[in-house]
Each structure stands twice: as structure tokens, then as C-alpha cells.
Image (tube, helix red, strand yellow):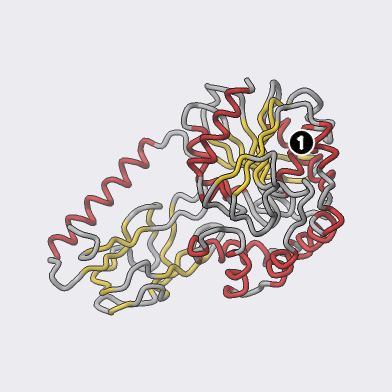
Amino acid sequence: MSQARIHLVTMPKWGMTMTEGRIAAWLRSEGETIDKGEDLVEIETQKLANTVEAEVGGVLRRILVPEGESAPCGAPIAVFAEAGVSEAEIDALAAEAAGAVREGAGSDAAAPRTRAIDVGGISISAVSAGSGDAGLPVVLIHGFGSDAGVWMFVQGTLSAGGRAIHAIDLPSHGASVRTSMTSVRAMAGAVGSAVAALVPEGRVHLVGHSLGGRIALALAAGASPALGTGRVASVALIAPAGMGQPVDPGFIEGFLAADRRRPMKEALRLLVADEEAIGPEMVERALAAKRIDGVAEALAAIAAGELGPDAAGRGLADRAATAAPVLTLWGTEDRIIAPPASGATLLPGAGHMPQMEVPAAVCACLSAHFERNE
């Protein structure tokens, strides 16, 4: 059966730890003809309420999950189909898809798990995956205004062979506590304490994206007494801030000012090479995070202190002081921080977030880097 004749609408997965969603409201009715991009359904999770748009145009033939009920991520919730598709065909395809989701859920013993780490009275959230049976552990550090979900396309791949992969939410980001901690050195101290709790002994690989790259370098250069020295096996930087190139002020200004869907989407589009990759769920996650008390103010303070023109080269000293091997990855189409003329592995077709745009290429580079340095 071709996709031109029938299309399943499935429960989306917003973030690594989301397992199911609840149908808050269907915005269209069975039998209606709907255009691609029109609002279709409102879905709620523990952290987010979001409106899902129709991925295709056509007739909404069947609503499979009624309002008020929940379904696991990936499960079919509705069906678009042409008039010539029989009810029996819809029944069969929906049942097959639901069965595949149930089988997959039963086999996912190593699903990501979240924990809160107390760091001197400050709660730092971390999402962990992998059994820890193979290779040195890895800690992933996201960038400005983001959260651990930015690693959702690489964490599972990197942990599949048994390596423990931990993604940390920076202070005032994601599920971590809101604080007045806005400098790289202060955030590095808190992250270092969290890393020491996640990996109590032995060496660890650090991976940092954008502002998280500066924090990773600060840790490798000894910024955290809790982590100590000599424990960082390697550092991988993805489009790092503070390496000499300025951060686009237009993105920072637009992101901080955005308080509605359209301006936030316009700001987020600068992050990627393919602007269509910015879906409504990413927009809603960004807006929802900024609406939490204290977050907008903390982000403004971080941007003013660490992402302005005078901060463009602040990470160079930490880079020079880092004894551990360093890998640098950069998207060729980065519009937030331009890739350097030399010294970085360039990833074609990616903007400022290659871990989301070309995750297979990023995973291949990271895996080889880890293996070389163990």
C-alpha cells in the first residue's frame, strides 16, 4: 500500500525520556479534508503541551486515540487515507503498527533514565543511557538555551555498544534548577561536580556543543576541583563558542526576544542548514523553557557575559591548557559561529547543530575519537 493512499499519524517523541503522550484535544474531526501544516491535535506530556500539525494533506479517515487517552511514542493515533482505501485496510495497518510499537517497548531495556544530582544544594539533571559495560563513559554538554534533548539523535547510537553516555542539563536549562550562576567558570564548577557524581572514578570523555564546548574545555583545563585533574581522557567540541569567532548577535537577540511561535521559529531556523527541520515541537519546547520563572533572565545574563563580542576568544586559554586530545567538529553551513579556516573536521550539509542534522556522521567521528584515546 503506497503512502499516497494512506498515512499513519503517530505519537511524537519530544526528548529522550518521553515514553508516551496524552491526547488533550483533536482540533479536526473524522471525515474532514485537511491541508498539510494545519493544526491537527494537541498533545500533552509531563513537561510540555504542544499542537501537532498535519504532516500530509488529505482526509482524516480515522481517529485511533480519543481525547483524554494516552499512547506510547510511535503508536498510531490517526489515519489519513483516500476514499478508495477500505476500512479493513485501515484496521490492518493500524493493528500492525501498534503491534510493532508494543514489541519495541518490551525490548528496550536500556532506555534513557533521568536523575537529579545535588551539587552544593543545586539540582543538576542528567539523562543517562547505556549499560557501562564497554569503553570509557562519555558526558555530553549542550549549548546556550538548549537542554539534554539536543543529543537525542546521538545518545542512543553511542550507547548501543554498552558505553555509558550521560547528557547533562546546564544550570538554568532543561530540568536543572534556575540559579544566578551565569559565567562559564561557575557553570563548569557545577557541571564538574555532576560529572564526578555520575563517574566517581576513572577517566571520562567530554563532548561539548557551542557554549558547552567552552565548558568542556574549562573542565579539561582544571576548572572543577570536584572533578580534579587527569580524569579527562579526551574532549570533543562541536561548533564551540570562544575559539575566536564571534557568535551571531542577531540569533542571540532574536532568541531572547521571542515570546511567540513565529519569532521563535525564525530565530531557531538560524541554527540549521535545512530550515524545514525546525518543527513545531522544537519551537514549543524552547518557548516553554523560557516561560519558567527565572529562565529568561538567566539566559539574558549568560548571553551578556559570555556570548558578546568581547568573549569571542575567551576559550583559547583553556584550549591551550588542555592536555587531553581535542577533536573539533563544525558544520559547513553554520550561521551562528562561522567555521574556522583550519583545525576542524567539517561536516557538509550541517549548520550549528550537526548532532541533530547529520547524527550518523557525528557519531562516526566521536566513536573513532573515543577509541583512539582509550
Q: Residue shown at 84%/46% (left/top)?
A: 314
Is residue 268 shown left or right of residue 302?
Answer: left
Q: Mark 1 highlights which residue?
A: 192
Residue 157 image point, x, y percent: 48, 37
Is residue 221 shown left or right of residue 278?
Answer: right
Image quarter where the C terminus lies is: top right
Is residue 285 shown left or right of residue 176?
Answer: left
Instruction: Name the residue at the front extreme.
Output: 341
Residue 75 image point, x, y percent: 34, 54
Q: Judge by depth and name the residue closer to the eye, 32 or 141.
A: 141
Residue 368 image point, x, y percent: 55, 28
- Amino acid type at mark 1: Gly
Q: Mark 1: which secondary structure? A: helix
Q: Quadrant of residue 12?
A: bottom left
Q: Judge by depth and name the residue closer to the eye, 357 or 180.
A: 357
Residue 130 image point, x, y percent: 52, 31
Badge 1 crowding class, 10 Å Cα cut-off, few under 14, some 14 to 19, many 20 or more, is: many
Image quarter where the N terminus lies is: bottom left
Q: Judge by depth and name the residue closer to the eye, 100 or 361.
A: 361
